[in-house]
Structure formats: C-alpha cells, structure tokens
Image (cartoon, coloured by chain):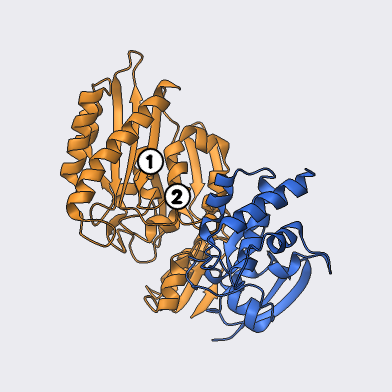
Chain colours: A blue, B orange
C-alpha cells in the first residue's frame, strides 16, 4: 500500500513525513523522525510511556495512527525543555529522584504538564488519579507525586 | 490496509459500501488499534470518521443533547450542561481507561466495540439514549439497548455506522447515576456496572425509572422488572431491596478472573441499590 504524505506540526515546528497507514504515531515519532523520547512500553494504551499531546489533548501515541497527525499539532517530551533550561517538572523530577530506569519518565512528564496546565493547584489525590494511566515499575510513585506537587507549587510562585 | 478520512456522512457511507464489509470505522482507536496490532482484525480500509462535522461535538436544544458519536470522552467530561443533566453518563465515561484513553475514546466506539463491560453503555441505556444510525439504506434511530447483540457483535447492518447520540432533556425532579465495581480504584474493566435513572412526582413518588447493568451478561441489560420495583414507590428501603433482588435475578454472568458468577450476581444488586440511592438524592436536589 502506498505511503501517506503527512504534513503536521511537532513541538511548534512544521514537519512532513511519509508513513504506512498501519504505522502508529509512536512508530513515526521514533523510527521516522528519530524523536525517541516517547517510549514504547505496552503498545496497547495501558502504560502511558508514549504520552504526547495531540491538539492539546493527552493521548497515547501508540493508539494514534501516524496519518491521523495530518494537519494537527503534536507536542512531545522533546519540546518540554526550552533549550538548556529544563521545565520545572523536569527539574523537580531530578531533585526528588522521581525516576530510576527512566522509561516511564517522558510519559509522566508530558502527562503531569497537561495536568498543571488545567489545574495549577492539584491535590495529591487529583495527581494520582490523573497519572493513573502512567505506569512506573521502579519508584512506587510516591516520589513522582511529590515532584509534581512541588513543581506545581513552584510554578504558582509559592 | 489503507486509511481514508472522509469529510461527510455520504462519503463515509459510499466508502463503507464500496468495501463491502472489508472496511472498519475508526473513531478514537483505543480498541481498534489494539486489535489491529494483535491481528484480531485485518481490514482492507480504515475509515476515520473524526473529520465529519456531524460526528463531532455536543449540541443542546429544547429536546436535550445531540452528541457526535466520535466526540472524545475528555470533551464530554468538560461539558457542564451535560454533566448537570446526565451526571450518570459523565461519571461512566470518566471511568473509561485513563486520562490518555479518554483523550481519544468515544461513545460511538465504546458502544460499537460491543464489550459486555463497556462503562458508558449502561449509563446511556438508563438515560434512554437513542443512536442515529446511517447506512446504505438511509437513516434510522435506534435505542442504545438495541445495538449490542453479543460480545463484539452489534445489530448494525453491513455499511451502517453510528453518527450521533440523542440524550433527552431530563424530566423535572429526576436524577441518574452510574457505579462500577472493580477491585482497584482506576484503570480496570468492570466486574459489574449499574446505571439508574429515575424521576419523582411532586409528592416524591417515583413515576419513571430505567435500570441497566453491564458486565453481568453477554450484552448490557435493560431491566424492566428492576425499574418496576421503583415505580410507584418513594424509593424507600423496601423498594430498593426489591430493585436489588430484581437486578441480581436478571444477571447471566460468566466466571472469569474478575469475578465469579455468584459474586457478580450479588454485587449487581448492591450496585443497583446504591446507584438508585444516588439518583434519588440527585432527583431531590433538582
């Protein structure tokens, strides 16, 4: 089957790519565009390691076809730091040691950023429910939750 | 496999007809992409219906709500008027998967995937929702409870697809609720789901009730006897006990890793009773 020519926006930049109809957005990001920050954990939408923003909505890139990116806006972990300056969430993940192996970390960061854009002062319960679709097999979640709450406090100016 | 993203209902009908059963509709993709990867389905064509204006968004009019079948659960969950009118529907769709899943998942997909455990379906059935179905022979309006015929099977004819849902305007003094039981707090599939909608008269007597259960039979169930247990009552302890008995009696569940037959039968009664009490509180508050 002929490949599709897709014109999209990724992290604010216009991007064009060719993809087969069955390729997922995650396949395209990693294998075509070499944006390997988004990880493949389960490839079935359960683990959240491939979390990206699609037109401002948090989604699993493994459950989106690459062709569906046509004309839309995609934000990935690669767009989170501004040059050498880490996003407060990234800094707080380091300060709180909220990662060990790191495979889940890009997904957690993208998902946590989406939360704080909607709710600048979430409760611990709200953080835990929002991040229920992101699995971490190392940390036990507690440090991740604390890092998100601390980043939220800093971003509010406390 | 090829992919098309038609811009109109007519174009979609033509594409599905031209592929005579070898095309699969794509809405949110949260079930379809998993099935594609696993090789459970191998369509020649995937027809993405999200670019069709009639399948997107929520409209309100004097009759109630019209919900495009491919509107994401995340969008639906942010619609205040919908949550105020049909909290049971919104709490059900907010139980589907994770935040990420709700960013893509749709009511049309949740219904047509035809899982017995789909969370939004009992809530829609209790609400009395109708589906607008379009196909090669034109358009028809179908109650939600008439769509699923078995696990993975629907009453849609070849080439038909769901364009929209209609939710009525809530009756005066009415309330509705959906409860799901799972052994954890998030990210699981229903052991039992129960949706209840009811309305009271000015004296507080129940004049209307619809009760629906999920995950306790090959299809979501609409329970006429359980509803009759409420109608004419003040939704008191005796009435909700009768509702619970009728709900348990209607179950035809399977044993699986999520629960045994005996457990599901028992929990179905408990959840139906609790959902009825929440619906009653909401009705009194309206």
Is residue A120 in view from this perspective? yes
In this picture, residue A78 sits left or right of residue B243: right
**How far is the residue under mark 1 from the one under mark 2?**
10 Å
x then y, percent, for residue A131: 56, 56
Q: Quadrant of the C terminus of chain A?
A: top right
Q: Residues within 10 Å of mark 1 (few under 14, many from 20)?
A: many
SS class, disc 2: loop
Task: Report the number of numbered marks.
Answer: 2
Q: Quadrant of the N terminus of chain A?
A: bottom right
Which residue: 59% across, 79% down?
Answer: A27
x then y, percent, for residue B40: 36, 76
Which residue in the protein does label 1 denote? B178
Which residue: 62% across, 66% down?
Answer: A99
Is residue B162 in view from this perspective? no
In this view, B139 is above or below B20: above
Q: Are marks 1 and 2 in contact (CB under 8 Å)?
A: yes
The residue lying toward the viewer, choosing from B183 and B285, is B183
x then y, percent, for residue B72: 54, 53
In this picture, residue A145 sits left or right of residue B14: right
Chain letter belonging to callout 2: B
The numbered dot on residue B95 is 2
Sequence-wise first label, 1 or 2: 2
In this picture, residue B140 sits left or right of residue A30: left
Can marks 1 and 2 be said to lie on one chain?
yes
x then y, percent, for residue B158: 35, 66
Identify the image quadrant of residue B244: top left
Q: Residues within 10 Å of mark 2 (few under 14, many from 20)?
A: many
């Amino acid at each position: 089957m002929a490949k599709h020519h897709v014109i999209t926006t990724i992290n604010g930049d216009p991007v064009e790519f060719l993809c087969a109809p069955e390729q997922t957005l995650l396949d395209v990001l990693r294998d075509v565009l070499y944006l390997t920050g988004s990880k493949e954990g389960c490839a079935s939408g359960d683990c959240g390691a491939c979390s990206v923003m699609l037109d401002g909505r948090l989604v699993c890139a493994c459950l989106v076809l690459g062709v569906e990116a046509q004309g839309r806006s995609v934000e990935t972990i690669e767009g989170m730091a501004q040059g050498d300056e880490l996003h407060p969430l990234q800094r707080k993940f380091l300060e709180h040691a909220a990662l060990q192996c790191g495979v889940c970390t890009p997904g957690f960061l993208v998902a946590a950023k989406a939360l704080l854009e909607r709710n600048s002062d979430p409760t611990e319960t709200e953080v835990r429910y929002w991040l229920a679709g992101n699995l971490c097999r190392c940390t036990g979640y507690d440090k991740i939750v604390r890092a998100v709450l601390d980043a939220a406090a800093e971003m509010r100016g406390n | 496999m090829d992919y098309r993203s038609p811009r109109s209902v007519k174009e979609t009908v033509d594409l599905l007809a031209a592929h005579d059963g070898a095309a699969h509709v794509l809405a949110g993709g949260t079930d379809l992409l998993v099935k594609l990867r696993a090789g459970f389905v191998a369509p020649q064509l995937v027809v993405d219906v999200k670019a069709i204006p009639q399948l997107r968004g929520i409209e309100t009019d004097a009759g109630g709500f019209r919900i495009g079948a491919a509107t994401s659960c995340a969008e639906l969950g942010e619609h205040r008027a919908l949550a105020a009118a049909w909290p049971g529907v919104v709490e059900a769709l907010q139980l589907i998967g994770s935040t990420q899943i709700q960013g893509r998942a749709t009511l049309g997909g949740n219904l047509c995937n035809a899982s017995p455990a789909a969370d939004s379906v009992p809530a829609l059935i209790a609400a009395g929702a109708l589906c607008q179905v379009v196909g090669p022979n034109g358009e028809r309006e179908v109650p939600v409870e008439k769509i699923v015929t078995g696990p993975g099977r629907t009453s849609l004819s070849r080439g038909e697809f769901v364009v929209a849902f209609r939710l009525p305007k809530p009756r005066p003094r009415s309330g509705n609720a959906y409860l799901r039981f799972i052994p954890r707090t998030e990210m699981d599939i229903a052991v039992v789901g129960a949706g209840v909608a009811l309305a009271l008269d000015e004296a507080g007597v129940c004049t209307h009730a619809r009760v629906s259960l999920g995950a306790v039979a090959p299809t979501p169930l609409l329970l006429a006897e359980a509803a009759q247990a409420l109608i004419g009552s003040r939704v008191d302890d005796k009435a909700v006990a009768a509702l619970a008995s009728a709900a348990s009696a209607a179950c035809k569940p399977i044993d699986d890793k999520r629960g045994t037959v005996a457990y599901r039968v028992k929990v179905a009664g408990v959840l139906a009773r609790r959902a009825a009490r929440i619906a009653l509180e909401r009705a009194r508050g309206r």
